[in-house]
Amino acid sequence: MNLEQLFLDNKEKTIEGRYLTLESIEPILKRINTDNQLSVIGKSVQGRPIYKYVIGAGKTKIYLWSQMHGNESTTTKALFDFLNVLHSGSDLAKELLSSFTFCCLPILNPDGATLYTRANANEIDLNRDSQDLTQPESKVLRAVFEEFKPDFCYNLHDQRTIFGVADTGKPATVSFLAPSYNEEREINDSRQKAINLIAGMNAVLQEFIPGQIGRFDDSFNINCIGDTFQYLGVPTILFEAGHFPGDYQREVTRKYVFMALVSSFTILNENVIEINRTEDYLNIPQNKVVFYDFIYKKVKINYDGIEKITNFAAQYKEELVDGKINFNAYVARLDDLEGFFGHEVYDAQGALYEDGGENVPKLDQKANFSLDKKLNFVNGLIKN
């Protein structure tokens, strides 16, 4: 199977970028509602509909939800790319539809998606509400779980650009987790199936982005939805869509999430997850917070009349302004950058830093400055 071509043939071209709201996907849902697959199963805090889309007639039931965190949109895009495969009429589509029943909740947190926030409109992290079920969105997710009785759960997320693959200096473009079901992080039959499936997806992705797949921390927290569903005996896989170099809109990462989804269903359909692949899973390096968007090295500053050479880092903050996401760079760390990497690294070679103020980089100030009055940096980047 040519996964690259499959993605190009099925990419949902009406959605792109980071800001993805209910209004963005409703036309797609209506278009692919060819046989009453779509229903409204609840409403958000602010009264927005939460949609359920069910397709397929197969025995194996797959439950997928995205944008539980409203500002994590990459997997929603990949989910619709995959749904286009199911509507393509291809042999692959026919095979998947006969083998699986897919139940999808795209944009579980529509208020957070509109606000571009992690939490919902009540400022509650839905991924910490799986036990108390205080929020309408959490109740919907759990009610569908109870009704649908899935064989596998796919918990679809994004992660920030700060994550790398251990200390390799490579970004964690896609990361996975088979959540724990108890404090001891033991492996039972349910978790084993999730582990084996992740090992299979990792093997496929390593062919495309070698060294850029991470394994998320498996500390147990019963308040997290993945841990809860794993505890309840359903194999659950956490997807984390991360950074690919230069891809701040996550359009490249989107492709690799799509590939992972398709590969996982191929693996399940071929029933090759029964082999114990715990060692392969544990050999996936763990995610680690080791990146900044920008690192500036060997910068000269004049501090109280004393010249010194220093380093500093800047990080983008994603800020919603007039319906668009602005990436605004702010100074995030000073001096000691041992063990950290930058997605962009500039060697100032001792050039003098000036910012029109005190001429010393300070935490949380905009990354606008010059070096030797020759190189001007605006929003972290060199301005030509």
Image (tube, grey):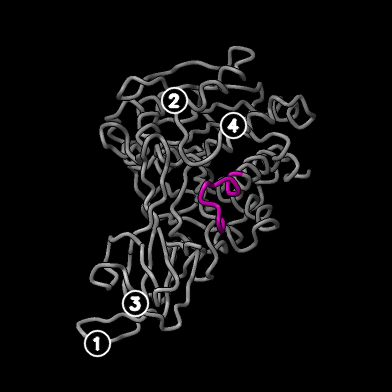
Q: What residue is shown with label 4?
A: 80
Tell me the residue that label 1 is attached to: 306
- Looking at the image, is 23 positioned above or below residue 342? above
Which of labels 2 and 3 is toward the front? 3
- Residue 336 has which mark? 3
| x then y, percent, for residue 360 | 27, 73
Residue bounds of the magenta highlight: 244-254
Q: Nearer the observer, disc 2 or disc 1?
A: 1
As measured in the structure, the alpha-carbon distance from the residue carrying label 2 to the one carrying label 3 is 50 Å
* Residue 249 drawn at (x, y percent): 52, 46
- The residue beneath circle 2 is 146
**Circle nearer the N terminus (2, 1):** 2
Is residue 250 highlighted in magenta?
yes
Q: Amino acid at mark 3?
A: Asp
Report which quarter residue 369 is drawn in. Answer: bottom left
Q: Is residue 325 or residue 167 the one in the foreground?
A: 325
